[in-house]
Each structure stands twice: as structure tokens, then as C-alpha cells.
Image: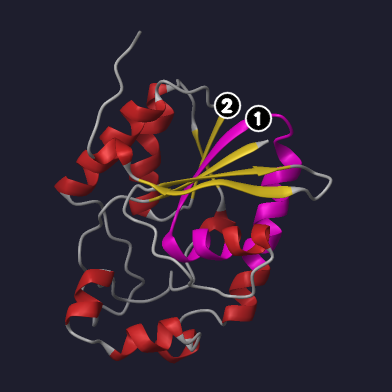
Amino acid sequence: MDLLWVRHGEPERIAAGRGVPADPALTPRGREQSERLAAWLAFEPIDVVLSSPQRRAVETAEPIARAHHLPVQIVAGLVEYDSRSDSYIPMEELRATNDPHLTAMYEGRWEEFGAESTETFRARVATTLDEIVDANPGRRVVAVCHGGVINVAVAIMLGLDRHLWFEPHYTSLSRTVASRTGVRSLASLNERAHLNARRESA
């Protein structure tokens, strides 16, 4: 099967202190990014559109599904490792302010800010990956989710031990190939052409 990983579009910022898990929607820019990706993928055959249940992922998946007359299928195992956090601060801001969460994130100390442990998260993503591959032989599947999920899923497919080893751009596309026999390969990583160009029909 062909398994295309998509990171959600740019989400709204949610400050800490609300006491409930943050579930930001897309910004206007994020919605534009998602529409551009959907228009780009409209030229390719797609059989299944999966999404994390988090709002920013669902809103990114919906235009893709609509372009192919498909439903968005929610997969709980695609949630991000910090899905229960009461804030969502974009990576750009974390870097600009040298936020200590960023260091903890890269060093795998995720539990310090209320997230899953790296071991728990990796095991969940591995199980979810196997379930997706087993359920979709011979299909082209788009999985819309989050940067951490994509990092770990692709690392598992490549046999890497690292967790956060590259930064997926908003609505970036990473193409992988997988079989139920265990063969896994990477075809492309972090594609962003759709953000700067549009395909023309023949």
C-alpha cells in the first residue's frame, strides 16, 4: 500500500491555564494551506482518508476527502503525544522564546509537560501503523495527523531509534510504502510544492 502522511495546517495558539485539553482550530492561513494541499492531491488517486480526532487534523483532512468524495475516518491512535496539554504553542514561538519545553521535547522528557512518555507514544504509533497497513492492502491512504506522530511513524518504518528527528512543515506530505509482510520504505519526506505551485490539468 501507499501511505501518505500529512501534517495538519497552521493551528491557532492556545495559552495555558484553561484546565482542559487544548484542541485548536486552523488559522485562516492553515485553512488556505489545507485547500492548496487538497487541490494538489486531487490529481492523484486516493482510496482512504484517515485523520487524528484532533480538530486541526480533521479540518486539514476534510478538503482532501471532499475532493475525492470520501469520508474522513477518525483514528484515535493518530493523536499527538501532548494531546492532553491545556496549551498549544507553535514551534516557531517555542524556538523564538527559547521555551524550556522545547529542550524537554527534543530530549524525550515529554512527561515533564504532561505528555505521554516516549515509550508509550512509540508503542501506540507502532500499533496504529500496523493496524492501518493490515486494513488497507493495495490502497492509497492519506493519514492526516501531527508532527510527532509522523516523526515516530517514519522512524519506525526506517528502523530509526530517534523520536523527533525532522520537522514536518504545516500540510507537508511524506510518502511511504508498506506491506503486511513487513516491507516498509520511504519515497519522499516533507514535500511542500503545493504551497508554492498549482498543478494544471492536462
SS at badge 1: loop
Q: Residues within 10 Å of mark 1 (few under 14, many from 20)?
A: some
Q: Secondary structure at mark 2?
A: loop
Q: Are marks 2 and 1 in contact (CB under 8 Å)?
A: yes
Q: In the image, residue 150 lies at what x, y percent?
A: 51, 58
Using the image, tell me which numbered label, if any, was put on residue 47. 2
Q: Is residue 126 above or below residue 194?
A: below
Classify residue 69 by image quadrant: top left
In the picture, measured across the screen, residue 28 lies left or right of residue 1, that is left
Question: Residue at left 49%, top 25%?
Answer: 70
- Front position in the image: 9 or 192: 192
- Residue 102, percent across and down? 34, 83
Kindly identify which numbered label has been placed on residue 139. 1
Residue 132 picture location, percent across and down: 67, 46
Q: Position of residue 74 (x, y in %)?
A: 52, 45
Name the quadrant containing residue 154.
bottom right
Mark 2: few/some/many CA within 10 Å (<14, 14-19, 20+):
some
Q: How many marks?
A: 2
Question: Identity of the amino acid at label 1?
Answer: Arg
Q: Amino acid at mark 2?
A: Asp
Identify the magenta region: 124-152
Residue for point 48% across, 72% down: 164
